[in-house]
């Protein structure tokens, strides 16, 4: 046989081998067991006896397909099939969602595993009211420190909500994390700690020093006209929601889960009632359990790679239409997986939506991974704001000090 004929034959065999691997990959995506890999390799060797194709070649091809050929996994689904993937989070007759008590550990775990989120009753109305007072005490103190001669912001008086009355005029309105003593009391509260200790199966935890959350209403607001009279006004921009996104690179999230690491959770506490129409949290129920399949069907952008950055699905991605609004009662804590696609709806009401962000993860005494990557990890925030707050002067018990890293947990 001439060299050109042999070369052509080898090329044909190679193509048959690659096509076979592609067909296996499309029919049954990875990960593969050892026996599955050996079976595929044996078939490849039979299809291409004149080509040297070893285990390394097979693994490299599988990796290339996973990165460059997500279309091999794309599945056409009916509305019924999509809906089955994303079951609605349980709702109640009063217009909110089902919530659990902090001691209902098994139900909390099961709900989080099924939906990618869970709602837990965390704080009393009295604590929430005190927290709202603390929030606006701090907001107005920041404005006063800037030397602004503006009206004090009041959550029930829409005529005080003008941009110039806030510490900053950005979307989030605030300059720094929440440093009021009440914010710290909420972070280290027993209901918060106990739930996260159960979820992590770890007592040595840290809590973030995160932000207040304020979303102004946008319709039927009483605002002054040119004559100074208070008249119903619409401020569409004030109530603008946040588009669907993952805060954690979804492909990195999947990689870490498959390697046995839990990337973690986020949480927000509703300080007033978050009714439908007030710009509630939006989520894709069942999104985290589905995320590995979604990543197989979509190519990771070249600029994202393994970076710990947020990512948005395309505007025409079908999963966006299955997102669900999560109205919360006062004092409820919504916990969701970093693998959840989420957003916030537009606040079309005449009220503010008020909340506090809280995140809890293993302390470095247990696993240094989490504190290294969280931008609101307490040690990071304390270094940045050491000239603003006397963190050592906080009135906290030993567990609270350990949650903030002011004392170490016993090894």
Image (cartoon, rainbow, N blue to C red):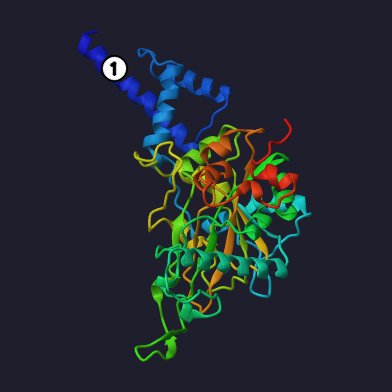
| Among the 4 quarters of the image, the one containing residue 83 | bottom right
- The reply, left or right, for residue 300 in relation to residue 411 is left
**Residue 391 visible in rendering:** yes
| 339 in relation to 236, above or below | above
Residue 369, percent across and down?
57, 34
Q: Nearer the viewer, residue 303 or 355?
A: 355
- The reply, left or right, for residue 387 in relation to residue 228 is right
**Which residue lies at the image location 43% right of the left edge and 16% below the top edge?**
45
| 36 in relation to 361, above or below | above
The N terminus, quarter of image: top left
Residue 35, percent across and down?
58, 22
| 157 in relation to 284, above or below | below
Residue 257, percent across and down?
57, 37
Question: How many numbered marks does the figure carry?
Answer: 1
- The reply, left or right, for residue 143 in relation to residue 95 is left
**Residue 199 visible in rendering:** no
**Which residue lies at the image location 67% right of the left edge and 68% below the top edge?**
130
Q: Secondary structure at mark 1?
A: helix
Dot 1 alpha-carbon crowd within 10 angstroms: few under 14, some 14 to 19, many 20 or more: some
The C terminus, quarter of image: top right
Residue 102, percent across and down?
75, 56
| Among the 4 quarters of the image, the one containing residue 368 | top right
Q: Which residue is mark 1?
A: 9
- The reply, left or right, for residue 252 in relation to residue 106 is left
| Among the 4 quarters of the image, the one containing residue 92 | bottom right
Q: Residue furthest right?
A: 103
Q: Nearer the viewer, residue 392 or 378?
A: 392
């Amino acid at each position: 046989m001439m060299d050109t004929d042999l070369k052509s034959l080898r090329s044909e065999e190679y193509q048959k081998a690659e096509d076979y691997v592609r067909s296996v990959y499309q029919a049954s995506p990875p990960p593969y067991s050892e026996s599955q890999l050996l079976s595929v390799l044996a078939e490849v060797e039979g299809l291409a006896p004149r080509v040297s194709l070893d285990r390394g070649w097979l693994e490299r091809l599988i990796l290339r397909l996973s990165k460059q050929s997500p279309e091999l996994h794309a599945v056409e689904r009916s509305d019924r099939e999509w809906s089955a993937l994303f079951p609605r989070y349980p709702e109640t007759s009063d217009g909110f969602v089902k919530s659990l008590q902090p001691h209902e550990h098994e139900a909390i775990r099961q709900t989080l595993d099924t939906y990618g989120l869970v709602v837990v009753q965390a704080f009393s109305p009295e604590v929430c009211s005190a927290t709202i007072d603390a929030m606006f005490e701090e907001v107005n103190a920041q404005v006063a420190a800037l030397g602004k001669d503006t009206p004090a912001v009041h959550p029930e008086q829409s005529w005080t909500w003008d941009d110039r009355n806030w510490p900053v005029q950005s979307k989030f309105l605030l300059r720094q994390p929440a440093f009021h003593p009440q914010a710290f009391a909420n972070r280290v509260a027993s209901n918060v700690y106990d739930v996260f200790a159960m979820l992590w199966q770890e007592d040595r935890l840290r809590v973030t020093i995160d932000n207040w959350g304020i979303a102004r209403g946008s319709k039927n607001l009483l605002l002054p006209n040119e004559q100074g009279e208070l008249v119903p006004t619409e401020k569409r921009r004030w109530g603008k929601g946040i588009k669907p996104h993952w805060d954690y690179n979804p492909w990195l999230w999947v990689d870490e889960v498959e390697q046995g690491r839990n990337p973690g959770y986020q949480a927000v506490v509703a300080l007033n009632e978050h009714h439908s129409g007030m710009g509630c949290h939006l989520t894709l129920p069942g999104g985290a359990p589905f995320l590995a399949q979604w990543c197989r069907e979509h190519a990771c952008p070249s600029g994202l790679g393994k970076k710990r950055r947020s990512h948005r699905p395309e505007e025409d991605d079908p999963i966006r239409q299955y997102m669900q609004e999560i109205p919360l009662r006062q004092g409820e804590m919504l916990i969701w997986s970093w693998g959840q696609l989420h957003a916030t709806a537009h606040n079309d009401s005449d009220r503010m939506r008020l909340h506090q962000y809280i995140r809890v993860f293993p302390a470095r005494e247990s696993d240094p991974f989490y504190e290294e990557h969280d931008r609101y990890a307490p040690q990071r925030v304390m270094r940045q704001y050491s000239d603003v707050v006397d963190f050592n002067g906080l009135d906290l018990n030993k567990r609270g000090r350990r949650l903030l890293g002011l004392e170490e947990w016993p090894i």
